[in-house]
Image: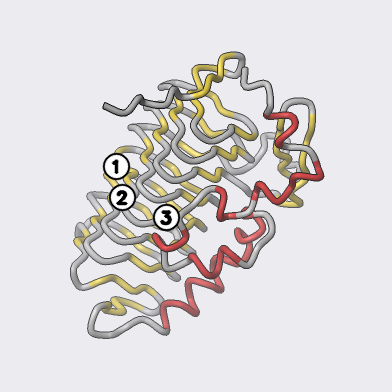
Amino acid sequence: MIENQGRLCSKGMINIFNALNFFDLSKSMAGDFLSGYEKVWDALPDIKEFVTSLGKSLDKNIYDEIKENVWVAKSAKVAPTAFIDAPCIVGEDSEIRHSAFIRGSVLIGKSCVVGNSTEMKNSIIFDNVQIPHYNYVGDSILGYRSHLGAGAVTSNVKSDKTLVTIKCKDEKIETNLKKFGAIVGDFTEVGCGSVLCPGSVIGKDSIIYPLSRVRGFIEEKSIFKDENNIVKKQEKSAR
């Protein structure tokens, strides 16, 4: 187990949950929006309003408004069987595949893949993110070049319907949110069939093993094998 996670989660260090610690904010049209929140998950209730406002300001030479408050880049590919509800923005060179179900309040960045039978709602997806096969992403933010393996999902509501807390060793951090899926940092790989439980916060450049059940805060550059076996990634020596 990573021994210093409890220290990192102490209340005096709450600023570690600022968006800057998880994302390269230049890799999303939501960068300025997210930078305005002390804790990145505080942005989740405001995504709908943000996407609607941003969409109205987009360059009409680059984006088509295919229906009210749904903007799709002219260079994007959307399968005829995909469903996109408002408000939503699909970025340049992104691909929305067969039977994708986008329920609204979603910003999809540039060069992303939203795959077959993937469902999304109230989420921000940075550039170059891949959600390619049978995924669910709700009330979540996925960072630059992050990837969800086939069947990996973000669970966004607790079974008892109480407010979501973030578990960090022996501490619980209140979010005051009933719906909160996951924060997934840049370059993080989530293995096939994994479940990110409500309030999962995963640092950048991490690896989640397939078939994992993840809860709480995972420090950046971690390898999550199971909840009792989280190790630091080894730095590659220069050649």
Q: Position of residue 139 (x, y in %)?
A: 55, 52
Q: Is residue 68 left or right of residue 174?
A: left
Return the disc, 2 or 3, that comes first in the chain's sequence: 2
Identity of the residue drawn at 44% across and 21% down: 211
Cβ–Cβ below 8 Å for labels 2 and 3? yes
Q: Earlier in the sequence, mark 2 or mark 1?
A: 2
> Which image quadrant for residue 80?
bottom left
For the residues labelled 2 and 1, say whether their Cβ atoms are less than 8 Å apart.
Answer: yes
Q: Position of residue 9 (x, y in %)?
A: 73, 37
What numbered label is drawn on residue 125?
Answer: 3
For residue 114, which numbered disc appears in the image?
A: 2
Query: Residue 171 or 219: which is nearer the viewer?
Result: 219
Which amino acid does the dot numbered 1 rest on?
A: Pro
Q: Which residue is located at x 50 percent, y 43 percent? A: 184
Q: Name which of mark 3 and mark 1 comes first in the sequence.
A: 3
Q: Which residue is mark 1?
A: 132
Figure quadrant of residue 214: top right
